[in-house]
Image (spheres, rainbow, N blue to C red):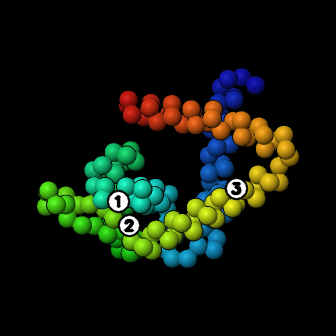
Amino acid sequence: MSEADFSGALADVLAGIQRLVRRRLRHGMTGPRLRGAQVELLRLVVARPGIGVSAAAKELYLAGNSVSTLVNQLTKAGLLRRETGQDDRRSARLLPTDEARERLRVWQERRAALVREQVERLGEDDRAALAAALPVLRRLAEGLHEEVERA
């Protein structure tokens, strides 16, 4: 397999796994269906409560107005609260609601269980190969992150 073929196949497999996990997890979730960018913003706000819209946009590599739209959608859905900044009354701090925290907790548990079930179906050699690949995949992700930061 050529390097180009390998790179394309790897990208396809990673994207395919992510897409299939998202699709599988949609079933059985309560509340309004969340899109990928909405989930990413919620995860960021849960990890960094009080983050501002501009900082969230930078972290997610999205335009500020796109994040503002997401904030409005998630606020309307009862998953985010927007508080006026203490230092600058024009700024907003983003905070997750208890419902958002619970939805993410359930989603993360279901995701882990789904992947665990599939990994357990693999043979011992395949599980060992996946475990050995994790550090390399993390370095790949770090390299992609650094490249995006430089752009």
Say which residue appears at 84% left-offset and 40% top-offset.
Answer: 125
Residue in the image at 16% along x and 61% along y: 86
The label on residue 62 is none
Say few, some or many: other residues with alpha carbon within 10 Å of mark 3 (under 14 / 14 to 19 / 20 or more): few
Q: Are marks 2 and 1 in contact (CB under 8 Å)?
A: yes
Check the picture and name the quadrant holding the N terminus: top right
Pointers 1 and 3 in contact (C-beta within 8 Å): no
Q: Amino acid at mark 2?
A: Pro
Asked whether the residues under the numbered discs 3 and 2 touch, taking CB atoms below 8 Å apart as contact, a structural biologist would say no
Confirm whether residue 23 shows in the render: no
Q: Is residue 12 above or below residue 143?
A: below
Identify the secondary structure beneath mark 3.
helix
Residue annotated with mark 3: 115
Q: Quadrant of residue 95?
A: bottom left
Q: Is residue 17 above or below residue 150?
A: below
Observer-nearest residue: 47 or 7?
Answer: 47
Q: From what the image shows, is residue 66 above or below residue 142?
A: below
Q: Earlier in the sequence, mark 3 or mark 2?
A: 2
Q: Residues within 10 Å of mark 1 (few under 14, many from 20)?
A: some
Earlier sequence position, callout 2 versus callout 1? 1
x and y, in percent, of residue 50 in the image: 30, 59
Q: Which mark is residue 49?
A: 1
- Kindly identify the amino acid type of the residue bearing the numbered disc 1: Pro
Three-letter residue code for mark 3 = Val
On the image, the x and y values in percent for residue 18 come to 62, 51
In the displayed structure image, the side of residue 28 where residue 78 appears, left or right? left
Dot 1 or dot 3, earlier in sequence: 1
Q: Quadrant of residue 117?
A: bottom right
Give coordinates of residue 110: x percent, y percent.
Answer: 64, 65
Q: Which residue is mark 2?
A: 96
Q: Is residue 131 left or right of residue 60?
A: right
